[in-house]
Amino acid sequence: MDESPPLPLMPGQRLARGVCRALRQFDFVAVEELVPTPGLRVDVMALGPKGEVWVIECKSSRADYRADQKWQGYLEWCDRFFWAVDGDFPIDLLPEASGLIIGDAYGAEILRMGPETPLPAARRKVMLQKFARHAALRLQAFRDPGVSVFQV
């Protein structure tokens, strides 16, 4: 069994951790790196107490934001979309018609709510199932690191 220490978190991963922590104050639960459909992987997907589905894309730099060509594809998989950045990020780059979260590894604050575009019922059901499976697989990997959680 490999007992090497875990790799340090990348800047976007640290930001995602702070966002997930902050969302708990609104009674949201979150998972990281969820794939809503092949070819897309959201940084954070959050599930609210009334079944709301939020997607949060964490950007650690201007270059990281400019390299993201897929973010508009995330809009059809959530009720609200947010950018999460740190306090040094040039927020004027971000579209105003999306939510904005400023944070760090330990917490975050919602500065602007993303517009609400409710998911169709069938898509919501799919996303809730994906969220549940993703969370269960992550928990299984945590509890039993020797078991592969990758789907075949």
Image (cartoon, rainbow, N blue to C red):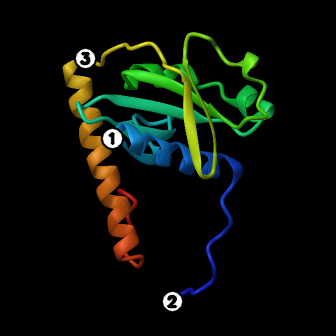
Residue placed under numbered mark 2 in the picture:
1
Badge 2 element: loop
Tags 3 and 1 in contact by the CB under 8 Å rule?
A: no
Answer few, some or many: residues within 10 Å of disc 2's Cα (few below 14, many 20 plus, some between 14 and 19).
Answer: few
Q: CA distance from mark 3 to mark 2?
A: 45 Å
Image position, residue 20 (x, y; %): 48, 46
Q: Choose the circle earlier in sequence order: 3 or 2.
A: 2
Q: Choose the circle earlier in sequence order: 2 or 1.
A: 2
Answer few, some or many: residues within 10 Å of disc 1's Cα (few below 14, many 20 plus, some between 14 and 19).
Answer: few
The mark closer to the camera, 2 or 1, is 1
Residue placed under numbered mark 3 in the picture:
120
Image position, residue 90 (x, y; %): 78, 25
Quadrant position of residue 10:
bottom right
Residue placed under numbered mark 1 in the picture:
27
Q: Which sits in the foreground, 22 or 29?
A: 22
- The residue at the point 57 percent across, 40 percent down is 108
